Amino acid sequence: MYRIFTLIGQYFLLMNNVFKKPDRSAVFWKQFVQEIEKVGLSSVPIVAIVSVFIGAVITIQASYNISSPLIPKAYVGFMTRETMLLEFSSTMIALVLAGKIGSSIASEIGTMRITEQIDALEIMGVNSANYLILPKITAATIFNPLLMLMSFIIGLVGGWMIALTTDIITPAHYIDGLRMEFKSFYIVYGLIKMAVFNFIITSVSAFYGYNASGGSREVGRSATNGIVSCSLCILIFNLILTHVLL
């Protein structure tokens, strides 16, 4: 328990150094654009692939579980839309990104720590935490919620493809379900969750990388600990945000 509180205290001390005005705004914005490609655009293929298959699977499962003739088939599209929007496209995609982005950030910063590149920045009077971590957090928190919208849309397309290529439900019934009782706030809810989750992913993984020590084995261990901690925090904050927002 003492170690947990120690880690939390160290995390907030690091964030205090991270969230300071950059010494050179031009350098920050240049890094910001580069990080959008690293933490956002590079994740588009895996998010798209996972989403289209999950959307298809949810449609199949929903169709086979609605066996009563009293339940309209349109509810298949409704269930697919609600599942993708409320949970999968934010929480599940965030867990996928925790493994991809989190390990990359922790390994990158951890390698810089053990090769003394961070120490060199500090000697030159550079706020290394601000210089290395702030662009990553900002880029992921601002850009990656768009991945949630992309995942949601592609997931629905995956469900539509199943409706089009099989006889479990007609495309017309599926689309009717997508239009059924749509609540626009759910999109806002998903975007808020995705922004919070990406802040957690980048900041926590950067924390473990920044505090790495020893050799390459320790860098790997820091990356692993960062992914585990990110995933746990995502699940905890998913519960909190769901209770507060809904």
Image (spheres, rainbow, N blue to C red):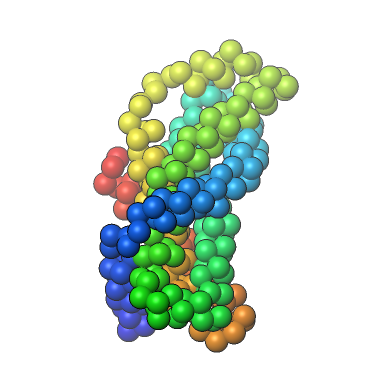
- The picture quadrant where one finds residue 16 is bottom left
Would residue 235 be visible to someone looking at this image?
no
Residue at 35 percent of width and 75 percent of height = 125
Residue at 56 percent of width and 64 percent of height = 103
Residue at 56 percent of width and 75 percent of height = 111
- Against 86, residue 105 (above or below) is below
Q: Nearer the viewer, residue 51 or 138?
A: 138
Q: Which of 79 and 136 is in front in this view?
A: 136
Across and down, in percent, residue 57 comes to 64, 36
- The picture quadrant where one finds residue 183 is top left
| Count of numbered labels shown in the rendering | 0
- Against 177, residue 111 (above or below) is below
- Answer left or right for 15 relative to 33: left
Across and down, in percent, residue 86 comes to 43, 38
Residue at the far top in the pictured view: 172
The quarter of the rendered structure image containing the C terminus is top left
Residue at 58 percent of width and 32 percent of height = 154
Across and down, in percent, residue 155 comes to 57, 33
Q: Which of 154 and 176 is in front in this view?
A: 154
- Answer left or right for 33 relative to 239: right
Residue at the far bottom in the pictured view: 214
The quarter of the rendered structure image containing the N terminus is bottom left
Across and down, in percent, residue 114 comes to 54, 81
Would residue 246 be visible to someone looking at this image?
yes
- The picture quadrant where one finds residue 202 is bottom left
- Against 29, residue 120 (above or below) is below
